[in-house]
Amino acid sequence: MHYVYLIQSEKDFSYYIGYTKDLKKRFKEHNQGKTKSIKHKIPYRLIYYEAFLNKTNAIKREYELKHNSCKKENLLKRLANASALSSSG
């Protein structure tokens, strides 16, 4: 499997979108500060992920979320709505 994931910094609440073949390992690496560009924002929490059977589709989705602000905003709104619904019940 291949994964596109969204993590959020617990320090400043910023988001990071990435792609990986091993989600558990990659998430652990982020929280260990092994990603230079975002290590100053640890710790992170996993907010969302999508699983893909092939690498090509995963990379296309990652690119779409990183470079299409409407797609990213729609995803964040969907997650916020789902969170609000689950916490109100």
Image (spheres, rainbow, N blue to C red):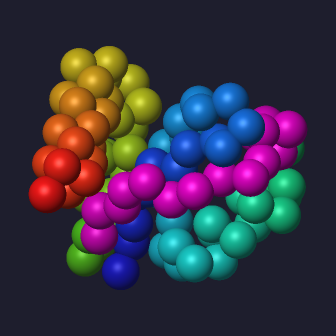
- Counting every numbered tag in the picture gives 0
The residue depicted at 74 percent of the width and 52 percent of the height is 43
Q: Position of residue 12 (x, y in %)?
A: 68, 30
Taking the magenta stretch, the answer to whether it contains residue 39 is yes
Q: Position of residue 59 (x, y in %)?
A: 38, 52
Which quarter of the rendered picture does the N terminus lie within? bottom left
Q: Is residue 31 left or right of residue 18?
A: right
Residue nearer the viewer, 13 or 31: 13
- Near-viewer residue (65 or 85): 85
Residue 75 makes an appearance in the image: no
Q: Residue furthest front?
A: 89
From what the image shows, is residue 22 above or below residue 60?
A: below
User: What range of the chain is rendered magenta?
Assistant: 37-51
Say left or right for 5 vs 85. Answer: right
Furthest-top residue in this view: 69
Q: Quadrant of residue 50?
A: bottom left
Nearest the eye: 68 or 44: 44
The quarter holding residue 24 reads bottom right
* Image point (65%, 53%), residue name: 44
Q: Nearer the viewer, residue 82 or 89?
A: 89
Quadrant assignment for the C terminus: bottom left
Residue 62 relative to residue 51: left or right: right
Can residue 43 be seen in the rendering of this structure? yes
- At horizontal 43% and vertical 54% (from top left) the residue drawn is 47
Image x and y of residue 68, in percent: 30, 22
Point 58% across, 56% down: residue: 45
